[in-house]
Amino acid sequence: MTIPRDSIFYKTRYRQEKGQIEFSHFRQLAVQQIPEICQSIDRFDGIRRAFSFWVDKTDEEDRLQINFGTRKMWAKGVDGGTVAERGPRLLYSLSSIDGVVLTALYPATSELGSVAEDHIFLRIGHYGGIDLLDKLRSDLKDLVAYAYVSSLELEPTIADRIRFWWLRKTQPHSIDQKFVRPLTPMTWAASASKFTAAAFLIALLRPVGVLLAYLVLVYLGLAALGEHLH
């Protein structure tokens, strides 16, 4: 539907139409490139064999979902029966308003438990098709790493743990269906400054005695850092 340039909705509608064109271009090329990219990613094949893998090729032009399937866990349920674990998913979705693209990671889940978040947004905003393609390899590597971080029976690497600790701190996500905002730069600065000051204080007071250092931390409201004294 064409909207006159003098319409108050013109700019929003224009961004939506442009976003649709760009997203369709990305979706078409991504479907072609995903199999080759995945085969070049370390640990992908092991996850694929355990969970199965497919790309959702439905006719919906406003989304693209990349899925690890469901597997039988080694662990038993509370009734002693076999438990199924659904693998992680990577979703690209075009908003019906303003052409905004959402890229989100969904964790592995089972009745025995899962990570705290329902999903993590890797990005939210206006992106051209080439921009999204440029990020596709990185997103697929995050998907593989998320399998290790969120599955109950896999052991993530230190790099995996650091990566998702960082994403949980810096990216918007959802916990119990509630939107969680990332830390702001000011919050990060305050937190880093407090930690640096506490670490310096601990180093300074260690010769005086652990007890005295701990009492000072309590006085400053930093008792949680007392574990670093041991």
Image (tube, helix red, strand yellow):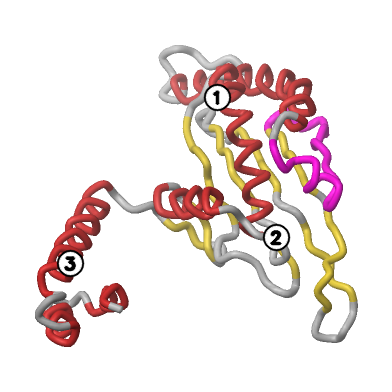
Q: CA distance from mark 2 to mark 3?
A: 35 Å
Total marks placed: 3
Q: Are marks 2 and 1 in contact (CB under 8 Å)?
A: no
Horizontal side, residue 20 vs residue 125: left or right: right
Q: Residues within 10 Å of mark 1 (few under 14, many from 20)?
A: many
Of pointers 1 and 3, the one earlier in the residue sequence: 1
Q: Which mark is first along the chain, 3 or 2? A: 2
Instruction: Inspect the image, locate mark 3, and give the three-letter code of the amino acid beneath it.
Output: Ala
Report the residue marked by disc 2. 154
Q: Which residue is mark 3?
A: 198
The reply, left or right, for residue 135 in relation to residue 51 is: left
The residue lying at 50 percent from left, 48 percent from top is 163
Does the segment drawn in magenta span residue 56? yes
Look at label 2 and name its amino acid: Leu
Query: Is 14 drawn above or below residue 160 in the view shown?
Result: above
- Dot label at residue 16: 1
Q: SS at mark 3?
A: helix
Which x, y percent locates residue 219?
A: 12, 82
Asked where in the image residue 191 lies, by quadrant, the reply is bottom left
Mark 2–mark 3 contact, CB under 8 Å?
no
Kindly indicate the quadrant of the structure image that contains residue 31: top right
- Disc 2 crowd rating (10 Å Cα; few below 14, some 14-19, many 20+) is few
Residue under the point 44% across and 50% down: 166
Please provide percent x and percent y for residue 68: 78, 47
Mark in front: 1 vs 3: 3
Q: Quadrant of the N terminus?
A: top right
| Range shown magenta | 42-62
Residue 137, horizontal then vertical, whole percent: 63, 29
Relative to 119, residue 227 above or below: below
In the rendering, which numbered label is found on residue 86?
none
